[in-house]
Amino acid sequence: MKRTAHLKSLAALLLSASLLSGVAHAQLAPASAPTAAPAGATAEARKANIVIIGTGGTIAGAGASATNTAAYQSAVVPVDKIIASVPEISKVANVKGEQIFQIGSESFNNERLLKLGKRVSELLKQPDVDGIVITHGTDTIEETSYFLNLTLKSDKPVVVVGSMRPGTALGADGALNLYDAVLVASNPASRGKGTLVVLNDEIHTGRDVTKTNTFKTETFRSPFGPLGYVVEGRTLFYRIPARPHTMQTQWDIDKIDKLPEVAVVYAYGNVNPASIDAAVKNGAKAIVYAATGNGSVGDYMVEPLKAARAKGVQIVRASRTGSGVVVRNAEQPDDKYDWIVTDDQLPQKARILMALALTQTNDPKALQQIFWKY
Ligand code: ASP
């Protein structure tokens, strides 16, 4: 009798201890980090299947010497070789490489963007693929990731990654960036967060991220901060994207075969009005005017832009400042001129959004709503 009571109280003690430790663990562990345990036995037990698509860029670059951190040839190392150079990856995921392009990302155009998007979409439909990592040049990573963020129809993680230094350089950042990208793509917490960009220990949303420095490894910024960090094999999310993406948008990459021509015209003191006419003559269906300040338009540029609009070309006022909202009807009477403002999107991202929007409507009111929504 005495012994049973003793066992019962011991069991109660053990139960409360385990509950307590469970509570303590739940409080300590970040809410969105199910693979919070360091990569090891736990991660091994549920390894994800990740396809790494190689497109080129500095992450596939090589320099003449280890001190060439900024002068090198980009897009020369095949994706399988890059994967093989980071053996730690195989401990966290089953990866398969696929080379789709071998280019600097400045060479991306609409055709290549569509080809990449369609391939990613195809792979995401395969039940044995848990996530995708895309190795990409850093110059236009922000455009590709925004495009994928708006057009992919899957909740599975898609992570775009690059590096600022080639693998041959002292202090090369590609290996860790790639490892981190695979970690993020393998983590169920990354599902449903849209297309992500991982570099320099940070996780960004493809909507917001932009390159802000030509050579530093700390170049990627989101005006509202990153979504999270990758540290010591842990994927840590602190925010989620507020604007619609992937499953929630009105575009499906599988149904888009061509993107209309959208030009970006950069404003500066003494900007040549002929640049507007040139864009129109080149067949632009819309012009994103990367204006100064809050989308200000010089007095001698108003008429050329109005003339372009009269020819049916959509005009989007954006800002070259790098962040902030362009306020409708503030610097210019957009209602009167039938122009559109970009909200907070940078000119290069506004181009992507406008091209997608024009695949569905040419109504400026609907286009404006799209800019405010996405
Ligand atoms: N020009 C290169 C590219 O975007 C730069 C880089 O990858 O960092 O492909």
Image: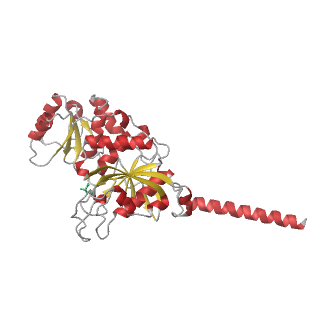
Residue 312 x, y percent position in the rendering = 19, 28
The image shows a total of numbered marks equal to 0
Q: Answer left or right for 348 relative to 83.
A: left
Classify residue 296 by image quadrant: top left
Q: Nearer the viewer, residue 17 or 298?
A: 17
Q: Residue at x 25, y 67 (%)?
A: 69
Mark yes or no: residue 342 visible.
no
Residue 325 x, y percent position in the rendering = 29, 45
Q: Answer left or right for 117 relative to 298.
A: right
Q: Residue at x 11, y 49 (%)?
A: 269
In which quadrant will I find the C terminus? top left
Q: Residue at x 86, y 64 (%)?
A: 4
Q: Nearer the viewer, residue 231 or 373?
A: 231
Classify residue 138 by image quadrant: bottom left
Residue 239 x, y percent position in the rendering = 45, 52
**Quadrant of the displayed image that contains ligand 1:** bottom left
Residue 314 x, y percent position in the rendering = 22, 33
Q: Answer left or right for 256 relative to 275.
A: right
In which quadrant will I find the N terminus? bottom right
Q: Residue at x 37, y 35 (%)?
A: 254
Q: How is the image coloured?
A: secondary structure
Mark yes or no: residue 126 visible.
yes
Classify residue 62 by image quadrant: bottom left
